[in-house]
Image (spheres, helix red, strand yellow):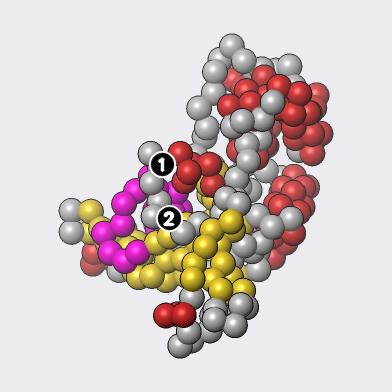
Amino acid sequence: MYIVGFSQAYAQRVRGGCYIENVDLLGKRVMNPLVSASELGVSFDGQTLVSPTSFHVDEGEALAVLGPNGAGKTTLLRLVSGRLRPSTGTITVCGMAPNEKSPKFRAAVAALLGSPPTASNLTVREHLTLVAASWNAGADVAAARSEFLLEQFGITRLALRYPHELSTGQSQLFALALTLSRSFDVLLLDEPEQRLDAQRVHLVGQILRSLVLHGKTIIMASHNADLVDQVCDRQLEVREVASDNLT
């Protein structure tokens, strides 16, 4: 919610991680968007990869990034994640400019933008437990979190397998579970439906929507209309880069 004309009277404060609010002179709380971008774009060697784009996403809201292949959906997610710097415009995530080197930013944002790195000598269960523990979960909590995710994604029977032993669909469910094994406020996903059949896409949709209902913020690129309808509150159409801008 925005209240025009009172910005000079706001005293901004941050409470508990990513929770950001403004307080006007009457003491009323006005929530700021968790993610806010204005004319955000990127070019490389004179070629536009993402046309200037503006959007915002609130706490407990999911945004679908839509568009044809080559429109820049993945690149836009990389801008939000801090893995790529913008050429134009501005973006803030939890009140911060994206910066992968910032511990505070890394703690706030989880992302699955491609296959996650794995260790050949660790099982699926051990991967989940290790990631949870590395993000300040105690050993017992990390183990419990691992078992919960195995059950939630329907992959408990795969717990003792190694990542290279999984099928493509199983690998995608494992990658999603691994991303959710750590704490976060904002979740970025690039086509989470990849390599999944309709039943498992629906399962993933249920899990993601539950996160939103519990206050997490999700931005995801997707080509699956059913998943978008199931998970997302709003949609952002990324404009395709003009053909004369390409080689």
Determine the residue located farthest toward the left in the rendered image. 45
Q: Is residue 5 left or right of residue 201?
A: left
Position above or below: 30 against 124: below
Q: Is residue 162 left or right of residue 203?
A: left
Q: Tags 2 and 1 in contact by the CB under 8 Å rule?
A: yes
Amino acid marked by disc 1 = Ser
Disc 2 marks which residue?
Answer: 96
Task: Judge by depth and name the residue closer to the eye, 227 or 79.
Answer: 79
Determine the residue located farthest toward the top in the rendered image. 121
Q: Is residue 176 visible?
A: no
* Displayed quadrant of residue 139: top right
* Displayed quadrant of residue 64: bottom right
Q: Position of residue 20 (x, y in %)?
A: 55, 62
Position above or below: 69 against 11: above
Q: Position of residue 205 (x, y in %)?
A: 72, 53
* Displayed quadrant of residue 88: bottom left
Magenta span: 71-90
Q: Tell me the SS state at disc 1.
A: loop
Query: In the image, what residue occupies the spot 73% across and 16% down?
Result: 160
Query: In the image, what residue occupies the spot 74% across and 29% down?
Result: 141
Disc 1 marks which residue?
Answer: 102
Asked whether 114 falls inside the magenta stretch, the response is no
